[in-house]
Image (cartoon, rainbow, N blue to C red):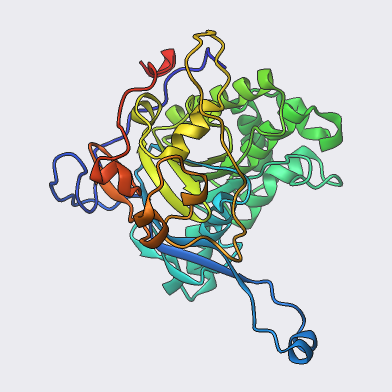
Amino acid sequence: MHSASAGQQPQARNTGTDLKAGTPRSVPALLQVRELTKDFDVSRPWLNRMIERSPRQLLRAVDHISFEIERGETLSLVGESGCGKSTVARLICGLYAPTDGSIRFDGVDLATITKRSDMLAVRRRFQMIFQDPYASLNPRWSVERIIAEPIRSHAIVKGDAAIRERVAKLLSDVGMAPSDARKYPHEFSGGQRQRISIARALSSSAEFLVCDEPTSALDVSVQAQILNLMKDLQREHGLTYLFISHNLAVVSHISTRVGVMYLGRIVEIAPTKTLFQRPLHPYTRMLESAIPDITMSGKARTPVAGEVPNPLNPPTGCTFNPRCPFAREKCRVDRPELLPFDGARVACHGVHEGWVPVEVVRQAPDHLA
């Protein structure tokens, strides 16, 4: 994966206030997420609760997170399993309904759209790429029918000949032969299936792709091919990505900015180069310490200690405090907010108040230099 080129540089941030200059922006970001929250009811059946006199139990998978994604950039959300990153992806795509908060796409609040025709017009502009390409492809359909389904549903082009021509073009764009359109998913490798999934996502002329761990089920060499393909398509088509992953080494190759999630909240968000050179939050530092050091530098490493707390009973204050080597009493009482800090945003009392040392811990990877 070291051959992957650097991702596109972000355009000027267009809404709210610029982190560095503090100047207002006029053009809205493509995606704006504000105070997004999702609770799942994990209570026992009603009769059991009545007999046992037990209350309902709600699991907060996403806890009041906010972020923006500009046109043409890639924001990656990373974190351990169960941190809520995939739930965020499903909320944005409409697979889950949010408990609270808002999602605005190109200035339109998705919750205010009532007409099915209006919703379809918006949904056509963004698609999702799933983790397991075989599970997300209908094994009974040919590749041509799989890719053509969004084209027909949204009436992108009409006529069988025109549809076949578009399918062939899409297959060529993702590095496959037009003759593959007659085959079925089981005839392809995992990497080829993921290319088919990407072609299907692009078939509706989407401009925003939500990528839910699209490379985690693939071999390392195939991961590099898919990442390079996605970056090439981003340059050619002006695509915008939300990239979900648990692997910081992977997101370093594709991201413009990286957000680190822990137990449903974003604890740090920064430009990719900044986050790798100078991670601020203790959790981010632990995640980076888990990246294999192929240079054998011998530098001290801080392993990720402990387990993620039970989300049904999260710790008070900062939810990372039971695992944090810098935790103080304030961390156990007051929940830190995600606040600006020298070109990034971080939710850590110690960083903002100065008792957690801030230093450059490593040189940026070659492709980010």
| In-front residue for pair 202/253 | 253
User: Could you tell me which quadrant the N terminus lies in?
Assistant: top right
The x, y position of residue 156, in whole percent, is 56, 50
Q: Position of residue 52 (x, y in %)?
A: 76, 87
For the image, the number of numbered tags is 0
> Horizontal and vertical percent for residue 24?
15, 51
Q: Nearer the viewer, residue 12 or 181?
A: 12
Q: Which quarter of the figure has residue 337?
A: bottom left
Closer to us: 67 or 133: 67
293, 158: nearer the viewer: 293
Could you tell whether 79 is left or right of 53 in the image?
left
Please state, as top left, top right, bottom left or bottom right, where the C terminus lies in the image.
top left
Q: What residue is shown at x 61% (from left), y 62% (from top)?
A: 95
Q: Is residue 240 visible?
A: no
Q: Is residue 108 above or below residue 165?
A: below
Q: Residue at x 43, y 16 (%)?
A: 365
Q: Residue at x 51, y 50 (%)?
A: 322
Q: Is residue 256 above or below residue 267?
A: above
- Residue at 39% across, 18% down: 364
Name of the residue lying farthest toward the front = 329
Q: Does residue 234 appear to the left or right of 187 in the view shown? A: left
Q: Is residue 218 above or below residue 121?
A: above
Tell me: residue 63, above or below residue 361: below
Q: With 280 as the anchor, is 52 left or right in this view?
A: right
On screen, residue 123 versus residue 54, left or right, reads left
Q: Is residue 292 visible?
A: yes
Q: Position of residue 26 (x, y in %)?
A: 18, 52
